[in-house]
Image (cartoon, rainbow, N blue to C red):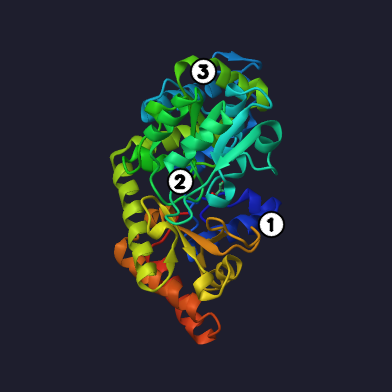
Amino acid sequence: MDHGEGGSELERFDPDIFAAVDGELKREREVINLVASENYASRAVLEAQGSVLTNKYAEGYPGRRYYPGCGPADDAEAIAIARAVELFGCGHANVQPHAGAQANMIAYMAALKPGETILAMDLRCGGHLTHGSAANYSGMFYRAVHYGVDRETEMLDYDRVADIARREKPRIIVAGASAYPRAIDFEAFRRIADSVGAMLMVDMAHFGGLVVGGVHPDPVPVSDFVTGTTHKTMRGPRGGFVLCREEHADHVDAAAFPGTQGGPLMHVIAAKAVCFKEAMAPGFRSYQHRIAENAKALCGKMAEEGFRIVSGGTETHLFLVDLRPQGTSGREAQAVLESVGICANMNEIPYDETPPTVTSGIRIGTPAVTTRGMGPAEMEELGAMISTALKQRDSESALAGVRSRARELADAFPVYPLC
Ligand code: DSN
């Protein structure tokens, strides 16, 4: 890592933590990252996030804070809000949520009273913990009911969602997922919500970048609330945001502060502003198209290699592979792939009968490899490499061959070359 003339203060003062940070940089450079929710933030984002804005308490909102000296913090947050509103074309944006989970908590608090009903995607079918899982606040404070995917097609069945909505009469319907490879029809969700007098919330934490890039349908025009993260396909700092119609603005702001959070992370908010500026730059749109093109190429190669792809394909940045025909689990596949320098996380497939710590599938995503500059040719090769590693997982020589090629590919498509 280049620290300029003075060298690294962190290295001098705390070599153990320096080693962890340096180890992560080395890992990110050397490993092929196919974790669908991860990406590489730019140097400008890292600089804003590692800045002195971390020192500042700024409870409240621009122009109405509970601390003195908030001028620069006000500037950073006002810029972030204005950019989010312009980028997503929404009435109001709150950029204070610390992460996607907090963004969802804020939207629920703005929309619901405790005990009211949420209708959202089942965790086992690709939903998120914050979509009403019993283990999460969303399932504890609200009455959560779920829709899943069709057992045959493994895709959303909007008629079935409508039936459940008519039966359960939710106050809010949540669309969006963490592990669903298909485009979501938000207009269909809006019609269902209207038919039962419910509000519509969309969690686009995963596919927000694809929405900006015009690759995925845009939920903003038809939703009451849209939540998102800035670190996945958006490629910014780790953090969340809530978008809403103007009429919900005060409720959303009050739900963020003082409702659920204290001091906003001003350094992260500054980095979110940088992320939004990057997302407005011309290259971002084509980046998002390349992510989806790469997902299709990698998914297609794995299908050609004989793997069963959940729902038969992908229209997003990710896809799911059912590993049962290969006689392996998601956990074993994750470990085998990691041993050859390829990261992809174990994931439940729809109606999975194994525990979430084992799973029958892996989730594969292309945002990070696309940031590195890889294209369809590399995806084809990666598909073949993953196939070899999983099918010949007991052959150390086969694994060694994949490991060596993975490292060559990582070196040929460097990340953070100037760090
Ligand atoms: N943990 C994130 C993911 O990997 O999808 C969701 O919060």
Alpha-carbon neighbours of circle 3 within 10 Å: few (<14), some, or many (≥20)? some
Which residue type does callout 2 highlight? Arg
* First of labels 3, 2 by sequence position: 2
* Whether residue 261 is situated above or below residue 132 in the rendered picture: above
* First of labels 2, 1 by sequence position: 1
Residue 15 - label: 1
SS of the residue under disc 2? helix
The answer to whether residue 85 is seen in the rendering is yes
**Residue bearing mark 3:** 249
Which residue type does callout 3 highlight? Ala
Query: How many numbered marks, from 0 up?
Result: 3
Question: Toward the viewer: 338 or 69?
Answer: 338
Alpha-carbon neighbours of circle 2 within 10 Å: few (<14), some, or many (≥20)? few
**Residue, x 62% and y 31% (percent of image)?**
105
Q: Nearer the viewer, mark 1 or mark 3?
A: 3
**Residue, x 41% and y 61% (percent of image)?**
414
- Whole-angstrom CA distance, mark 3 to mark 2, is 32 Å
